[in-house]
Amino acid sequence: MKSNNTNTKLILLHPSSIHKNGGGGGGLVGVPHRLWLIFFISFFTVAFTLTFINSTIPTYPPVSNHPNLSLASNTPLSPSLADALLHYASISNSTTTHMSSAELNSISASLRRCSPSCNFLIFGLTHESLLWHALNHNGRTVFLDENEFLISKFEQSHPGIEAYDVQFTTKVKEFPELLSQTKAQVRDECRPVQNLLFSDCKLGINDMPNHIYQVPWDVILVDGPRGYFPSAPGRMSAIFTAGVLARSKRGGGSKTHVFVHDFARDVERVSSDEFLCEENLVETVDVLGHFLVDRMEVHSSSGFCTNSTSSSSKTSSVADDDVADERK
């Protein structure tokens, strides 16, 4: 019995002996050790692979925190880059329809004064349009033009440009009559301080996008629409509108730089005298007039200027003089 009890205990404690007796040839005695070995090899392989990947792939800061991007959004255009842009723009101006180097520098200097964030409104799409957008790269630049097709093509070719078409109802040959009507209504529809969106003044542009009237413009350039033949729209509406926007300015600096190109032409010169005023004329550079117009309180004045220096007699022959040499 002792011998049998011993055998019974051996059977219960060593079940693998059954497999051995079944002709197993080694059985599963080493299986647990091989499994642990495989587990450790796999673990260290995976750990090594992850460590290698993390150490060789570079990491980058979030785009919003990238130092170069944050600097680009807060710093003005460097003087050297601005000078380079002006240089190459001036040497490419080989015809009389483009601005001279002195004219470009005059406008650029005013943009630098309100840098890094100027509100720049431009009447007319011209050879210099991309230059203005680049020089005011941290500010807001808005283009207005009479030609809907050109506006559409310009926006398609240059995504990010803000441009709108404006319908002008005036003609150069009508200027004497329009000037007389405007002066007669200077205390009413054509007053110097108002929201032109709700005005019926014939020289006021009231079909621009609504938000344009609310922006405190720092610089306004009148280089359009066309004004070199009798049936052209002329720039009297653009100059009148620029004068009202400057005097109605709320927010930002109190004064607005207003530039009028082709200042030697009768319509441009007389309109500027009436609505921008000779006392506000800072300088003339070639055929560019530069005015600095201060904001005005409502009902603080009965007119645009302290003294009106122009007369409608100056406009009697504005249509046909030197058409071939006039700018657009």
Image (tube, rainbow, N blue to C red):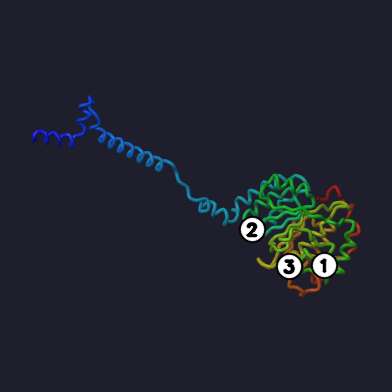
Q: Which residue is mark 3?
A: 248
Q: Which residue is mark 1?
A: 190
- Helix, strand or loop at label 1? It is loop
**For the point 81% across and 57% down, which residue is it?**
235
Q: Earlier in the sequence, mark 3 or mark 2?
A: 2
Of 321 and 204, nearer the camera is 204
Q: Position of residue 305 (x, y in %)?
A: 79, 69
- Note whether 159 is above or below 205 in the view shown: above
Q: Which mark is residue 24?
A: none
**For the point 65% across and 51% down, which residue is it?**
134
Spatial distance from mark 2 to mark 1, Cα to Cα?
32 Å
- Note whether 327 is above or below 271 in the view shown: above
Q: Amino acid type of disc 1? A: Cys
Q: Quadrant of residue 268?
A: bottom right
Q: Position of residue 130 (x, y in %)?
A: 69, 49
- Would you say the residues marked 1 and 3 are in contact, meaning their CB atoms lie under 8 Å apart? no
Whether residue 270 sits left or right of residue 33 in the image: it is right
Spatial distance from mark 3 to mark 2, Cα to Cα?
23 Å
Q: Amino acid type of disc 3? A: Ser
Foreground label between 2 and 1: 1
Q: Residues within 10 Å of mark 1 (few under 14, many from 20)?
A: many
Q: Position of residue 231 (x, y in %)?
A: 88, 52
Q: Which residue is mark 2?
A: 112
- Helix, strand or loop at label 3? It is loop
Of 36 and 21, nearer the camera is 21
